[in-house]
Image (cartoon, rainbow, N blue to C red):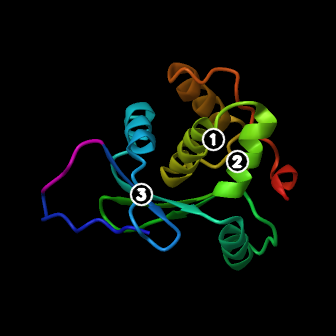
Amino acid sequence: MVRWPNRAMGEREQGLRVSVSDERGRPLRATGLALWLRRVAPRRARGAVSIALVSDRRIRSLNRTYRRRDYATDVLTFPSKERDFLGDIAIAKGVAARQARDRQHSFATELRVLALHGLLHLIGYDHERDRGEMRRLEQRLLTRAGIDGLIQRRSLPETRK
């Protein structure tokens, strides 16, 4: 995953910076995803974030290592404690493709939905503990972005494949 260079003390960049790579850290030309996420991100999402599009095998390994759950999930986040770096988002390409097909929308749309979901986790939202606050914000942002009614997040066990 891509790490952003440290900024000089006192220098603050406004907004969100997004990089997209493959699971080996090689940059991908996914400017549409990066631009879209910057456009729809909540105002409090300031700093850099890296998104890695990974294999189902890789995300299963990450899920097993970091969450002790032995299945390929759709998205994982790794928050950072570094100044101006929010963290990493890993998205499973195979799971995303299956979910897009099941939900009858494009792979690009599913990547956007998962990237936004991951970003919300990186800025502190937790749908397992917040009584629906994250879900409501996520739906509001998706509706504002024109992805209305396409997504209702499934529970994690349903993403196992």
Q: Which mark is residue 28?
A: 3
- N-terminal of the pair, mark 1 or mark 2, is 2
Tell me the residue that label 2 is attached to.
97
Rendered location of residue 53, percent (x, y): 55, 59
Extent of the magenta region: 11-15
Q: Helix or strand or loop: what does disc 2 sit on?
A: helix
Q: Where's the N terminus, which quadrant? A: bottom left
Mark closer to the chain start, 1 or 3: 3
User: 10 Å neighbourhood of mark 3: few (<14), some, or many (≥20)?
Assistant: few
| Residue nearest the viewer, comparing 102 with 158 | 102
Question: Which element type, helix, strand or loop, lies under badge 1?
Answer: helix
Residue 101 or residue 139, whichever sits in front:
101
Residue sitting nearer the eye, 14 or 49: 49
Given residues 33 and 82, the one toward you in this image is: 33
Q: Quadrant of residue 108?
A: top right
Residue at x 71% of width, y 65% of height: 56
- Which image quarter is the C terminus in? bottom right
Q: Secondary structure at mark 3?
A: loop
Kind of residue at badge 3: Leu
CA gap between label 1 and label 3 equals 16 Å
Q: Main secondary structure of the magenta part?
A: loop
Amino acid type of the residue that numbered disc 2 sits on in the rendered structure: Ala
Tag 1: residue type?
Phe
- Residue 107's label in the rendered image is 1
Residue depicted at x 18% and y 63%: 7
Of all residues, the one furthest to the bottom in this rendering is 65
Specify the quadrant of the image occupied by residue 152: top right
User: Circles 1 and 2: CB distance less than 8 Å?
Assistant: yes
Report the side of 132 relative to 32 (left or right): right
Q: Say if the magenta span includes residue 62.
A: no
Q: CA distance from mark 3 to mark 2?
A: 17 Å
